Image: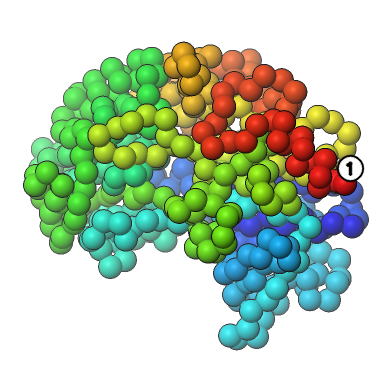
Amino acid sequence: MANVVVIGAGLAGLPAAYELRHLLPKGHTVTLISSESKFTFIPGLVRVALNLKPLSHVQLDLARLAKRHHLNWILGKVVKLDPKMRCLTLSGKAISRETISGEAASGETIDSEPGTDTEIKYDYLAIATGASLALDLVPGLGPHGGYTQSICTPDHALTARQAWIDFLKNPGPIVIGAAPGAGCFGPAYEFALMADHELRRKGLRNQVSMTYLTPEPYAGHLGVSNLKHARKLTAELMQERDINVVENAAIATVDEQTVHLSNGQTYPFKYAMILPAFRGASFIREVPGLADEQGFIPILPTQRHPDFPEIYTAGVSTKIAQPDKTQVPIGLPKSGQMAEAMATAVAHNIAVDLGAIQDSLKVPTLEALCFAEFGETGIAYVAAPVLPHPKTGERKRSYAVRGLWVVWVKAAFEEYFMVKIRAGVGLPWFEKLGLKTLFGLKMLKSLSEPLPVTLPDMASASQEKTTIHTTRG
């Protein structure tokens, strides 16, 4: 029987593990490896950083989840991957009993010997590590060794929260934005507009000037060009809130109280939150032929690696090139919804390849819906799919809508998501039905159906079929 290993227990990794456990017979092992002991709903960290919600409200204990849902859980950090030997090396603090003694998976862990590495063999591997933060690309960026805050990790959110609490005692200029190469802009807009809302609520806004620095070609681009109404609605909202937007901004360096752009412009601050560019995990970058220079992994339509057929990837680790040529480099957003769809496809296709289910292979459509909370209002951004047609530049659906209802829907979705993670559910049928009925979005297609778009660097469906045939051979 197979050992299917999932690296990462975030918005892609944990749903992938759940789906695999549902689809595979009990004789197969689903091993979940995470460097963190808790699952974190990353979109909720904006509120944590602004002291609007405790971190515990967006976290769940992985050991309990693994035990409840029959996952072989390993707490540890992957430091090496050998695709030829199908082997992972971990340098972690704890390892699963099943891996050591062959006992039934319980989700319990025991301490490994200090200074020792642990090898884990796999038959199939799903890489869902999320992003490593490229803070080093901009001198002075980041909360540890730098001068800016981040909301990309639980640790960063807590540091940002304490800095925010201190800032409120002695307010001054705020700078918020994203570094060159960043691809996830929604949280930066949310932080800026929710910070504005909180400052107004506390009667401090007149003491604070706010500047939004972005490498986007225009406010509301969000890494996805030509969304209908997105530019107008986003720019109007920033203007209404008296937030100075600097477009095509290339942050070069940051010192203790000033952000410096590459064109020589400077922006002083007492509080700064700048989102960094992403890259793949270090162990990914060290494997020849696995990923590009940034550590993003190329895929076939079904999320399988074109050269290592036992390896799949989902979420931020996936290589999806930005089709727009912009003055300052930007990435392409990979939303939580897209990550879930990729994870579901990964689990389904591994189950098909193992013969556990009889079905066609599935392909994520990359149709995305983003609910952005902006204080007393919000904007829903829809891009179906995220990548436009390479010839026409059109999308099936593309629009943005503003209203208070967006705030309510986002809050409800967060509660729903945490409930389904507790319940051990990935992407259930009723969620797919709701997205299709309410927003016209379809998360998955069969490989035999026409793909909505050809991803850059993605191999053809015919190569996919050849790879599968060879693997099964």
Q: Would residue 288 appear left or right of 197 to someone viewing this image?
A: right
Q: Quadrant of the N terminus?
A: bottom right
Q: Would residue 334 appear left or right of 235 to someone viewing this image?
A: right
Looking at the image, the residue that sits furthest to the bottom is 114
- 320 or 211: nearer the eye? 320
Please provide percent x and percent y for residue 162.
30, 59
Color scheme of the displayed model: rainbow
Say few, some or many: other residues with alpha carbon within 10 Å of mark 1 (under 14 / 14 to 19 / 20 or more): few
Please provide percent x and percent y for residue 343.
65, 41
Q: Is residue 67 above or below residue 234?
A: below
Please provide percent x and percent y for residue 425.
71, 41
Q: Amino acid at mark 1?
A: Gly
Residue highlighted by disc 1:
355
Does the rendering let one see residue 421? no
The structure residue drawn at horizontal position 58% and vertical position 54%, both measured from the top left corner, is: 290
SS for dot 1 = loop
Q: Would residue 414 appear left or right of 106 to someone viewing this image?
A: left
The structure residue drawn at horizontal position 53% and vertical position 14%, both measured from the top left corner, is: 396
Q: Is residue 271 above or below residue 435?
A: below
The structure residue drawn at horizontal position 12% and vertical position 40%, both measured from the top left corner, is: 209
Please provide percent x and percent y for residue 110.
70, 77
